[in-house]
Amino acid sequence: MKQVAGPEIGAILEVEPAPRRTETSYTRVAERLRQEVITGSILPGSWLRMTALAEKYGVSVQPVREALQQLEGEGLLEMFPNRGARVKTIDRGRLIHIYEIRQALESFLCRQFAEEASLSDIRHLETLQGHHDKAIASGDRGLIMRANKAFHLFINGRGGNREAIDLITRHYGLSQMLRARYGFDEGYWDRVLRQHHALLEAIRARQPSDAADIGAAHVRHTMLDLLQRLDLAGI
Amino acid sequence: MKQVAGPEIGAILEVEPAPRRTETSYTRVAERLRQEVITGSILPGSWLRMTALAEKYGVSVQPVREALQQLEGEGLLEMFPNRGARVKTIDRGRLIHIYEIRQALESFLCRQFAEEASLSDIRHLETLQGHHDKAIASGDRGLIMRANKAFHLFINGRGGNREAIDLITRHYGLSQMLRARYGFDEGYWDRVLRQHHALLEAIRARQPSDAADIGAAHVRHTMLDLLQRLDLAGI
DNA sequence: AAATCGATGATTCTATCAAATCTGTCAAGA
DNA sequence: TCTTGACAGATTTGATAGAATCATCGATTT
């Protein structure tokens, strides 16, 4: 494919040189704020006072404002003109909706993986699941969660759909925050293990529809488990 | 330091009073910029100079900066520290990925609609399709597109999943821009009409899986049609 | 009790300066 | 001759402080 210069038509498929991303004040503030919101050290529903944040981070107000705009775009908080910014609350309804989106996306990506994965892809996925099994046997929760994330990330990322991955990882931050606070149910990881193996089986057998169904059910069970934990905590 | 006067644990399910949204300078700038990008009067790949925009809109640079941050969050443009903002280019790969996401979501929402819709919902959907049929018969393209949008919006919105709708309408802006430039294929609207009626039939018969399949195929055909138009235009 | 007014604290905008990046030119070296 | 690198200027972005604006809340008035 020959690329011809000329802003009219060429712009649409122009291959960008991808400028390197340096660091500035507002990117650093955004980074730190994002962490604090995700880890839950700033609670949902709380208002963020710009002057206070500016003082806290040792910058002026403007960089804080821009960081907030940025995080609003990511869906972590809401901005109200002349009123300020507030960390989004997570009512049950929104939680369910977010998991529905993730269910739809991951189900689709599982189907795609089962259709298109090469043999070495499948081999690699088996390896990842092996790590996951070992992690569960060890009982180290940090290790388990990392192995689980790696497993899903490989399936989701295989199709190269960056937009979808961004959406899912964004939601991942949210569930991470909630799990950090409310934990997992008793038999949770055993069920995850069984479902992963079932998914692997469907992929090996090249049955995309089964893979899609299992993927959807997997996300759905995760959501139900989380809702139950919220129940137990009286939320 | 008391930077936030936040509610305690209960905040998670608190129902917010939803402060009304007023208008400010940067929201207006964001609004206008969004329109210009979506309608294609600002071309993909072009750099946005803050000073120029500030002068054009008769404001200072800061509101422009914040509008840009906002639009970056919406995925319309990319910001590079110390380099500026650029309207995202739409290569074929990204276009396909975006339609894959929409396919996954709309398919899911069709299934949900077929499962949960009341009889009056179905009745109303039939009315909307009636308008769509008439619009196609009339040949008025603006009318057709509005009727089509209303039909899908009703299906997608029935479950009340605001997050999903936001995602889909965001993508809608993109496809609107491309259609404005590259148009539709010959038999496009006839096929849309047939698929809508098939979808209605599956919903009436309460067959969620069929509805999901038809919804997915519908989005997929739309994507293929658009890709073909790009081919014809030599893109 | 409802409405108005003013004080207070927060956000938003402008003007200005500092820092980074881009552009064009020109000389040195292969 | 062509490429490479460096340098000065012009341009653009980034940050700050202060002024203007807006929203909230309590006291006063109707």
Image (cartoon, coloured by chain):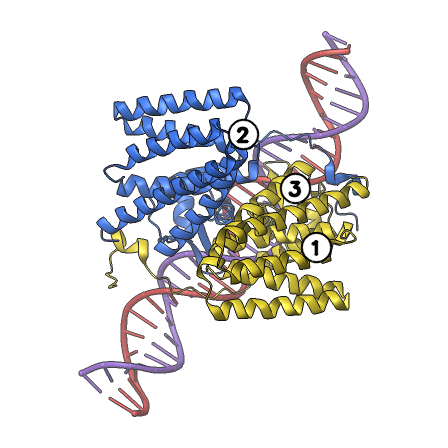
Chain colours: A yellow, B blue, C red, D purple
B147 displayed left or right of A112: left
Q: Report the residue marked by disc 2.
A: B158
Residue at 22% x, 53% y: name it. Answer: B234
Residue shown at the point (36%, 21%) measured from the top left: B131
Confirm or deny contact between disc 1 and disc 3 (CB under 8 A).
no
Q: Nearer the viewer, mark 2 or mark 3?
A: 2
User: The residue tagged with tag 3: helix, strand or loop?
Assistant: helix
Residue D24 spot, x, y in % from top left: 71, 30
Residue B57 visible: no
Rendering quarter of residue A227: top right
Residue A8 drawn at (x, y percent) = 25, 51
Of B219 and B3, which appears nearest the observer? B219
D22 vs B173, nearest the viewer: B173
Residue type at tag 2 = Arg
Subunit that carries the residue with mark 2? B
Name the residue beneath numbered marker 3. A95
Residues beneath discs 1 and 3 located on the same chain: yes
